[in-house]
Image: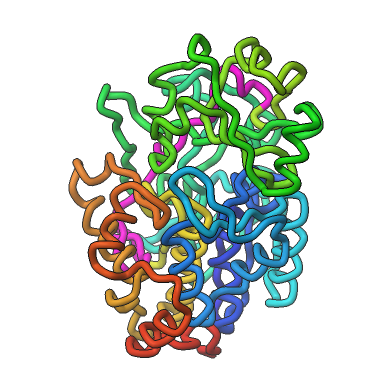
Amino acid sequence: MARVVVVGGGWAGCAAAYAASRAGAETQLLERTDMLLGTGLVGGIMRNNGRLTAAEELIFMGGGELIKACDRAARHTNVDFPGHKHASLYDITRVLREVERALQAAGVTVEYQTRVSKVSVDNGKILKVKSSDGREFAGDVFIDATGSAGPVKSCKARGRGCVMCIIRCPAFGGRVSLCEEAGIEEFAAVQPDGTEGAVSGSCKLLKDSLSRDIVERLDRKGIAVVPIPKDLITEGSLGRKVCQQYGTEDYMNNIVLLDTGHAKMMAPWFPLEKLRKIPGFERVRYEDPYAGGKGNSVRMTAMVIREDTMQVSSGKNLFCAGEKAGPLVGHTEAILTGTLAGHNAVRYVLSMPLLRLDEETASGDFIKYTGDRIKDKEGRNEKYTFSGAQYFERMKQKGLYTASLETIGKRVGKGGLTGIFAKKLL
């Protein structure tokens, strides 16, 4: 029996654990807090722009169960908002249970409030990890899905201090990197002004604190765009966003809200006293982060060089996924890298050739292209996502962006990838 230990229960970690278990491994998922999904609990956007293509590719490859979980929890589908088409908005209060059920059905053991603090390594190979409360978890192969945000000292040094975000470092202890503890060198993205990291891209407003008119628009259409009075526009606030696809004038001149159960505001922060001067926001309050009028959490500070198989380049029995694998932005991107990491972790234990996705698919091209880019220091400072910015332009130029299920299915089949992640390996 192959024993796979996944550290970090965000979207990437959940996808890795699910894929490893589906491939036949005994899989443990170690989560630092008392809930899974991490920043996915303040996310909610799927299938926008090129993410639709990537999501359907994953489904054809047999690795789309968590995509389907988001579909089942959707509040709105086929939503267009500035710069984005055919988005699906999942309910952040419902999606967690859908994911928990999927992991349970796959046989994944989830260990909550398990903060890994020590790693035992012998000749470059990880033998076991130890939690801060003394429990030990041995494995044949390990997956680092700990992300790149936090702990508090990182937000204090690179941002505006702890703003009490969903990562909840003060309550559960700061994020600990499995790679770093194993002696793997990490890197941070660097902004044009020399600042390390990037600020989380959005805030969550308590929906009931908005005017009835705005709430009705959100409930009906899934989106509300509210112009910002000129004297309240905060120039430069979008420049350091991790989600550069939203760093445009539309988002500087308007409050763009999306309905994910709460109201997802597509801005990294907005001073509360100014926000309450906008019509309809007179009694608004932040839901996450609670200090969203001051700032947001800092991410992209703890990434590693990895192969196209998601194996950590300077590791042995160590794989990575999500933001640990580079400045990759979004839940679809995390699910994709996690699925490949989990599947290949089992292949590694069985001494099978590790899977590389065909570059004729958007998924394969994304993993290959971003993997090459982060080996260059300049490439590490970009942000990569299927939904916008540099990589979405590449998708369109290469003809990889399509909403045609027939085209996507043929492309996946041509690469010999149909159902690949649904197959038992042992």
Q: Is residue 126 above or below residue 265?
A: below
Q: Residue at x 68, y 71 (%)?
A: 108
**Residue 162 location (% of width, % of height):** 58, 23
- Render colour scheme: rainbow
Q: Residue at x 59, y 35 (%)?
A: 225
Where residue 415 sits, quadrant-wise, is bottom left
Tell whether 375 sits left or right of 75.
left
**Residue 30 location (% of width, % of height):** 63, 56
Q: Where is the N terminus found, in terms of image quarters?
A: bottom right
Q: Where is the C terminus found, in terms of image quarters?
A: bottom right
Where residue 136 sits, quadrant-wise, is bottom right
Q: Is residue 245 above or below residue 56?
A: above
Total marks shown come to 0
Find out whether residue 79 is within the magenta segment: no
Q: Nearer the viewer, residue 225 or 122?
A: 225
Q: Nearer the viewer, residue 421 or 254?
A: 254
Tell whether 376 sits left or right of 41.
left
Name the magenta segment's main secondary structure.
loop
Where residue 371 sits, quadrant-wise, is bottom left
Can residue 262 be spotted in the picture?
A: yes
Q: Residue at x 76, y 50 (%)?
A: 93
Q: Is residue 318 above or below residue 228?
A: below
Find out whether residue 314 is within the magenta segment: yes
Q: Nearer the viewer, residue 237 or 426?
A: 237
**Residue 365 location (% of width, % of height):** 29, 68
Can residue 113 be spotted in the picture?
A: no
Q: Nearer the viewer, residue 92 or 264?
A: 264
Q: Which residues are magenta?
A: 290-316
